[in-house]
Structure formats: structure tokens, C-alpha cells
Image (cartoon, helix red, strand yellow):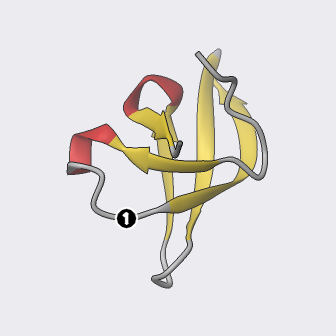
Amino acid sequence: MQQIEIGSLVYRKSYQKDVLFKVSDIRYVNGKKVIILKGVDVRLIADAEEEDLDIKQ
């Protein structure tokens, strides 16, 4: 499996991959890795746990 890093293009599995995001930051909150996302085609900022993300192939 590819590693998610800043600049990766990803989809959120929990939202049926409805929006394409670019990873803008990776933070650690209470010991958990949290990925900060920016929408590519829509004006949207979100966060997600790494397990909820699929990298665009």
C-alpha cells in the first residue's frame, strides 16, 4: 500500500469517495494520526483518519 503524504490525492471511504481531496497537513491528536484535506474541485476543508482514506490511482 502506498504511503499517504502531504500532496497525495485521496478519497474518503466513509463518504463513498464522493470528493477528491489533496492532503494539506498531517497532525497527531491524542496519539492518533489525523489527515487534513482540501477539496480539489470543491471549496472544502476536512479531516480524516488515515484508515478512512484511499489514495487515487
Q: For the point 76% across and 52% down, which residue is it?
A: 7
Quarter of the figure with residue 42: bottom left
Name the one closer to the observer, 21 or 2: 2
Q: With respect to residue 3, does 36 lie above or below?
A: below
Furthest toward the front, the residue is 57
Residue 29 coordinates in the image, percent (x, y)? 64, 29
Residue 38 coordinates in the image, percent (x, y)? 59, 66
Q: Which residue position is annotated with label 1?
A: 19
Q: For the point 46% across and 62% down, which residue is it?
A: 20
Q: For the point 56% across and 74% down, which residue is it?
A: 40
- For badge 1, the amino acid type reads Val
Quarter of the figure with residue 28: top right
Q: Quadrant of the N terminus?
A: top right
Q: With respect to residue 41, does 52 lie above or below?
A: above
In this rendering, would 43 be left or right of 23? left
Q: For the point 42% across and 49% down, which residue is it?
A: 11
Residue 17 coordinates in the image, percent (x, y)? 30, 52
Name the one closer to the observer, 29 or 42: 42
